[in-house]
Amino acid sequence: MKQTNKQTKQKHNESQKRYYQKNKDKYKEFRKNFDFKKYYQEHKERIKEQSKNYKKSEFVKFKNKARNKARQIKIPKEQLCQICNKKLAVDRHHEDYNKPLKILFVCRSCNKLLDNLE
C-alpha cells in the first residue's frame, strides 16, 4: 500500500518528536552554549541568500496568493469550527494552497493541530 504525501509527513513529524523527546537535554545544552550572533555574522551572506531564494519560491507565492484570497472571505458571525463544532471559528485553514478558495473555518486550537499535521 502506497503512502500519501500527508501520511509520510505525519510519520516524519512523529519520528522527529520522538527523537527530540529522547534528546531534549542535549538540545537545551546546545542552545545554551551556542552563540547565535556570532554564527549569523560568520554566515550572513549565505543566510540572506537562502532567505531571498525562499521568498521567491513557488510555494511561498502560492501560499501568499491563497492567504490574500482567504482574507477577502469573511468568517461568518457565530460560525462554529468545522472540525470540532464546539468553539467559534476565528481562523481560516487551507488544505491545499493550489485551491485558494477552498477554506475551512476553524478555531485556533484546531488550526494549530492541522498545521502540525502538514
Image (spheres, rainbow, N blue to C red):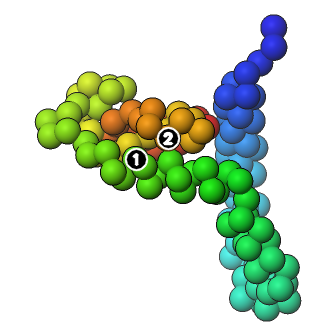
Dot 1 crowding, Cα within 10 Å, few <14, some 14–19, many 20+:
some
Earlier sequence position, callout 2 versus callout 1 = 1
Which disc is residue 4 wearing? none
Secondary structure under badge 1? helix
Picture coordinates of residue 67 (x, y %)? 47, 52
Q: Amino acid at mark 2?
A: Pro
Please provide percent x and percent y for residue 71.
Answer: 36, 52
Q: Quadrant of residue 39?
A: bottom right
* Residue 109 makes an appearance in the image: no
Tell me the element at label 2: loop
Labels 2 & 1 near each other (Cβ < 8 A): yes
Locate residue 91 relative to residue 24 in the image: left or right: left
Residue 100 position, x and y percent, is 49, 41
| Disc assigned to residue 100 | 2
When asked about the image quadrant of residue 102, the answer is: top left
Q: Amino acid at mark 1?
A: Ala
Q: What residue is rendered at 25% in x and 42% in y?
A: 75
Q: Please state the total of marks drawn on the protein image.
A: 2
Q: Nearer the viewer, residue 76 or 117?
A: 76
Q: Is residue 110 visible?
A: yes
When asked about the image quadrant of residue 12, the answer is: top right
Give the residue at x 73% y 28%.
5
Taking 75 as reference, is 4 left or right? right
Question: Which one is nearer the viewer's eye here, 34 or 76?
Answer: 76
What residue is pinned by disc 1?
A: 70
Residue 11: percent from left, percent from top: 72, 29
Left/right placement of residue 60 relative to residue 90 reads: right
| Residue at 54% from the left image edge and 35% from the top image edge | 99
Q: Mark 2 to mark 1: distance in Å? A: 7 Å
Camera-nearest residue between 21 and 73: 73
Vertically, is 61 above or below 52?
A: above
